[in-house]
Amino acid sequence: MPDAPGLELIRGEIEQDHPGAVLDTSFDRNQPALVVDSTQTLAVLRWLHDAPGQGYTFLSSLHAADYLPAAPRFAVHYELLNRDRVERLRVKAMLADRSAAGPAGDGGLPEIDSCVELFPTAEFQEREVFDFFGIVFRGHPNLTRILLPDDYVGWPQRRDFPVGGEPVTFTYNERAYG
Amino acid sequence: MAELAQANGSQNLDTEVMTINIGPHHPATHGVLRLVVDLEGEMVRDLRPIIGYVHTGIEKSCEDKSYWKVIPFVERMDYVSYFFQMEAFCGAVERLVDLEIPPRAKYLRTIFLELNRIHSHLVWLGTTALDLGAISMLWYCFRERDKILDLFEMATGQRMHTRYFQVGGVIEDIPVGFEAKLREFITEMPIRVGQYQDLLDRNEVFLSRTKGTGVVPRERLLELGVTGPLLRAAGEPWDLRKAFDYLAYPEMDFKIPVGTVGDNYDRYRVRVAEMVESVRIVEQALDGLPEGPHIADDRKYVLPPRSELSTSMESLIHHFKLVTEGYRVAPGEVYYSIEHPRGELGCFVLADGSAKPARVHFRDPSFVNLQSFRDMAVDTYIADMICSLGMLDPILGGVDR
């Protein structure tokens, strides 16, 4: 793992090439993380992938989290791995809630650039994030629901989506209770 | 002929592509997987896996349970490798609350994880050989698998979904007589693996169906995020047990089997060799099993021993608090990954300061590895596709979660 000063070095180098891309760094529980601007995430990922001395070429996991009630509300996490140095680095892209009730509400879905070109492994995982959080990945080759049915309404992993209340569609229930 | 081709709109009728649907209920798809396959004669020209048929919203349900109640939920994701899900979740929570587990717990966890790895590979070997027509393999593999389940039952009370790992260690020490039974198993198992190899390694049908089929280059596998035996079969010696320091693995002496070509035969060889290595790890862990407590002595996270409840008011209060509300975890997030029988199993836990996790996400290796299936199967025969799917070894409970 890059240690806390190493993380600041990485941040400084990214700042030279992409000013304003890194918003913050964190070193919580010995896990380094870069908090990046969602419009420049792809540039940062590409830099970490290609820049000499970095080589974070393996994307272990891509997932999202909902930090309700914090703002910005959503984050897409990229768990990067350098397999030569056995170092992990997390990149967090923060995304504001654009639903009508939110502060930046224009009714749309949060959007971020897809990284499928850079990491083909992200294809299924970006579809999963779209499926459960309603985060749109611009440029994804086939951004459809993956685990839920295509006609499902709602984004169930959001924190304000209630647990339960989902009707169970067994034929017996329909016969017995209409 | 030219006129005929003209009359058919220059279409060669032999090359018409037919789209067929395989699954979701089909014995060769190893679970509830649906494949939409474009076939040109017997050749697969394109395929799309369609998943989600056993999606049960486990990750969402976990957000509604206190930390210790999440453990039995996550076990049910990949239902063949339940100990790994438990370890990923418990390990992530231990890192969140900064809880060190005692050495004996580390060794016990290592023993059960490796037994579970053998168990998982046995289920894979039995069912995949069954797909390829080697029916007797299923009975032999399930015979040994049952012995592992007997061991699980003896130590944990359950054959499957044992809920044996706790945050802080394991729930109970191994019972009297367990060691002898385990030693019996580890002397027998390498002989059994040799017998499987005798049955398959000179089986002409098995060899001709696995050798040279389903090859995906190593670079492509890495791009697709494939880990585990599939990647190692392509010659990449990447194993999280060696790369990262967790449980008792740094103290164990074991090898990482790798393949050369990356075809289905190499995948079979790598997994069979891994079973032998796992037996070696179990043996070393059993020999070196340290004395001492099997669970951490931190009353804020770990239940007090049963015997103390009738004598100590303090213990009773702790017990009550832990069972009713559970423990609160300071805000933070952790990604913890371990080597699962199918690759990297990552667990992401986000804590918001309450007694329930705000997000539990599993990076399941079956889910990610399934993306490589198209590369394996396109432009091969449909029979090779079935072989590649077996060798891919997806567990659909883990894919859909």
Image (tube, coloured by chain):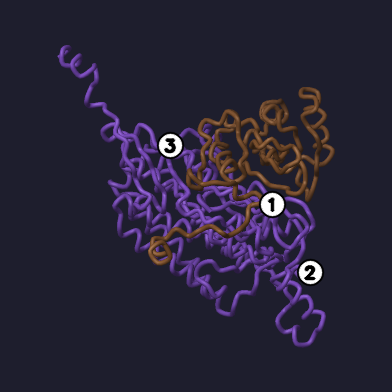
Chain colours: A brown, B purple
Where A177 sits versus A31, above or below?
A: below
Residue ID for mark 2:
B300
**Foreground residue among B25 and A103:** A103
Give the structural element (helix, strand or loop) at label 2. loop
Q: Position of residue A154 (x, y in %)?
A: 58, 47
Mark 2 packing: few (<14 Cα in 10 Å), some, or many (20+)? some
Q: Label 1 amino acid?
A: Asp
Q: Say if B62 sits above or below B179 in the image.
A: above
Q: Which residue is mark 1?
A: B245
Earlier in the chain: of badge 3 and badge 1, it is 1
Which residue ends up furthest to the top in the rendered image? B2
Callout 3 crowding tier (Cα within 10 Å): few <14, some 14–19, many ≥20? many
Q: How many marks?
A: 3
Residue lying at the far bottom in this picture: please name it: B310
Label 2 or label 3, whichever comes before in sequence order: 2
- The answer to which quarter of the image holds residue B83 is bottom right
Q: Residue at x 79, y 78 (%)?
A: B317
Q: Read off the chain for label 2.
A: B
Q: Which residue is mark 3?
A: B374
Q: Which callout, 1 or 2, points to the residue nearer the camera?
A: 2
Quadrant of residue B109 within the rendered picture = bottom right
* Residue A11 in picture, x, y percent from top left: 80, 32
Q: Position of residue B386 (x, y in %)?
A: 35, 45
